[in-house]
Image (tube, rainbow, N blue to C red):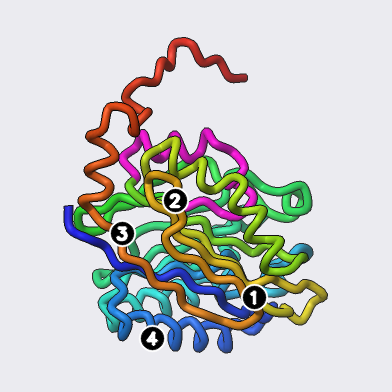
Amino acid sequence: MNDLRIAVVCMHSALGDIEGNLNRIAGMASAAAQGGAHMVCFPEFAATGYALEKPEKVCSAKDTNKIIDCLNQMGRDMGLVLIVGLIEHTGEKKPYIAQVIVGPKGLVGIYRKTHLSPTEKGVYAAGRELHVFTWGNWTFGVQLCYEAHFPEISTTMALSGADVLFFPHASPRGDPEGKMKSWLRHLPARAFDNGVFVAACNQVGKNGAGLSFPGVALVLGPDGRLLEQFQGKEETILFAVLNGETLKSIRQHRMKYFLPERKPGLYHFD
């Protein structure tokens, strides 16, 4: 398997400033491309800002279409895979918290958040599928913020072939150091237990509606070890190379790759 150079972005997303956010995404995507990235992950709600009430006033159905069209064009023009968060309207009563994936040939897919936090449940609809996506020789999954706390999601995606799990966040409050400590309590387990790379990023700064986001980003190897990290109060692009031989080595090691030894018949869930 070839190596994959990725970028994860800590980005400031102003609530409702879709044009400004898209311009910021374009600028940072261009910088990531110049840095040699093949795939760039932006935070949850990057294009729209994080709305906890009346999301339809922040992003209309027309806005959703505009954002997706704009991102499609960026992916084609830059020859990149972009993973970007937004409020998605589909014609249902409530919008989704979604992450759009586009590439050099246009739309790759859309992931809709399946596990909503208690503050999001009354505002958004929950997605109903755990997709994985493919680019080149790499298969990847996307989980959004609160979903990182449900190990079953990561295992399901790993069993579906995921080599990388991206965790875009819009996680407010606290400082970068505290947020990093929180992430390092659970995200290494998602990587180590499933033999996958993990990459995560958060929004950064004040969103103009009372929320402030600590800048945090990290990349973990399939052994759970930290490869790259960022903590700060400014926007940044964190680069990492995902080594295909490292992934192969972990998965061929009888004591380091656990998924083949699972016994699903013993596991019972409601």
Q: Along the polypeptide, which appears first: circle 2 or circle 1?
A: 1
Amino acid type of the residue that numbered disc 4 sits on in the rendered structure? Ala
Task: Tell me which corner region of the image, top left, top right, bottom left or bottom right, holds residue 258.
Answer: top left
Q: Along the polypeptide, which appears first: circle 2 or circle 3?
A: 2
Dot label at residue 92: none
Count residues near mark 2 (Cα–Cα under 10 Å), then give few for <14, some for 14-19, many for 20+.
some
Dot label at residue 31: 4
Residue 77: % across, % down: 28, 83
Q: Main secondary structure of the magenta part?
A: helix
Residue 29: % across, % down: 40, 81
Query: CA separation, marks 3 and 1?
Result: 25 Å
Q: Which residue is mark 3?
A: 242
Query: CA separation, marks 3 and 4?
Result: 19 Å
Q: Which residue is mark 2?
A: 225
Q: Which residues are magenta?
A: 142-162
Closest to the camera, between mark 2 and mark 3, is 2
Q: Which residue is mark 1?
A: 204
Tag 3 near tag 4, CB within 8 Å: no
User: Which residue: 45% across, 69% down?
Assistant: 8
Query: CA separation, marks 1 and 4?
Result: 18 Å
